[in-house]
Amino acid sequence: AAAIRLSGLHKTYKGNQTALAGVDLEVPQGAFHGLLGPNGAGKSTLIGLMTGLVRIETGSVALFGHDLARDPVAAKRHVGLVPQEVNFNSFEPIIETMVGQAMYYGVPRKRAGERAHQALARVGLEERAKRKPWGLSGGMKRRLMLARALVHEPRLLILDEPTAGLDVAARRDTWELLQELNANGTTILMSSHYLEEMRDLCETVAVLNEGRLIANDTPSELFGDD
Ligand code: ADP
Ligand code: ADP
């Protein structure tokens, strides 16, 4: 089955703001797929729908063949999400958040501890494990979000503008980690409004504008080769 299959997704928010006007998209397993579009295009709404954070009104979402509305637990089991907003609990030690997240995905407590340390090491935050996250810099918070999304070793990683606001070095570290994960078989869907980032990283890019997919093609077809 495809990692992601979206059919006929529409979303209208209260006040009649149409965020999505009929989106169909298929992302095969193993892909590094981009979701490009200007602010307001509907990228976060689309990511919200495919991770169960925004309620599906019309259309359907299937992840690895599991329908998200009918079988949310199975559909979400292999998915890691890096949301756009920093949203971890500032009052508990980082390691607690990490272990909690792993257990939420069904990893037993003992394994969860190991996985949590591994994921923190992966993003260079191992020595912060026992501290609370409020001392972290913006870049470190972003890395922690990535570690949290990886703690249950998801087969599909969905990232909403993961490099927004990062400096060049931090951005490059994120790219390297994502490329390494993808080389090891993790399917990646990443939104961005940086065209160069999409061109350098993604095999395929879906372009969203005013709630519609206006293209879904390779970077060289979309942007040329220069
Ligand atoms: P993007 O992630 O591409 O910037 P969004 O999905 O955040 O796009 O937004 C798409 C459209 O839906 C925008 O016009 C935005 O103002 C609107 N929108 C997003 N979230 C809400 C909400 N919770 N309530 C009302 N309108 C919203
Ligand atoms: P809560 O409802 O417990 O406050 P949050 O929205 O703060 O949940 O999310 C807690 C953690 O779960 C975050 O790491 C978030 O990225 C992750 N998460 C939430 N929904 C999903 C999902 N559908 N798939 C993968 N991870 C998710």
Image: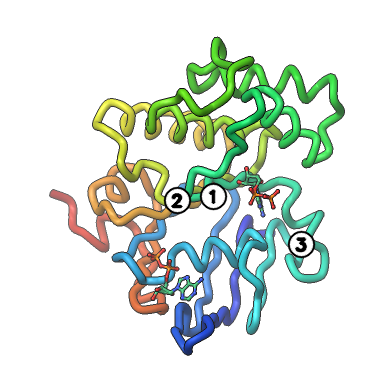
- The residue indicated by pointer 3 is 66
What's under tag 1, amino acid-wise? Ile
Mark 2 lies on residue: 190
Cα distance, mark 2 to mark 1? 6 Å
The x and y percentages for residue 204 are 40, 56
Q: Position of residue 41 (x, y in %)?
A: 36, 71
Work out whether residue 45 or residue 217 is closer to the camera in this orientation and state it. Answer: 45
Mark 2: secondary structure = strand
Label 1, residues with CA under 10 Å away: few <14, some 14-19, many ≥20? many
Label 2 is placed on what type of residue? Met
Residue at image coords 43%, 27%: 140
Quadrant for the N terminus, please. bottom right
Instruction: State the CA–CA distance, disc 2 to disc 3.
Output: 21 Å
Q: Tell me the kind of residue under disc 3.
A: His
Tell me if mark 2 has few (under 14), some (14-19) or many (20+) residues whose alpha carbon lies within 10 angstroms of its own. Answer: many
Q: Nearer the viewer, residue 22 or 92?
A: 92
- Examine the image and state in which quarter residue 165 appears: top left
Q: Position of residue 68 (x, y in %)?
A: 73, 65
From the viewer's perspective, is the residue at label 1 or at label 3 nearer? 1
**Image point 51% across, 67% down: which residue?**
46
Give the number of the disc on residue 158: 1
For residue 148, side relative to residue 205 (left or right): right
Identified at 71% across, 46% down, the residue is 78
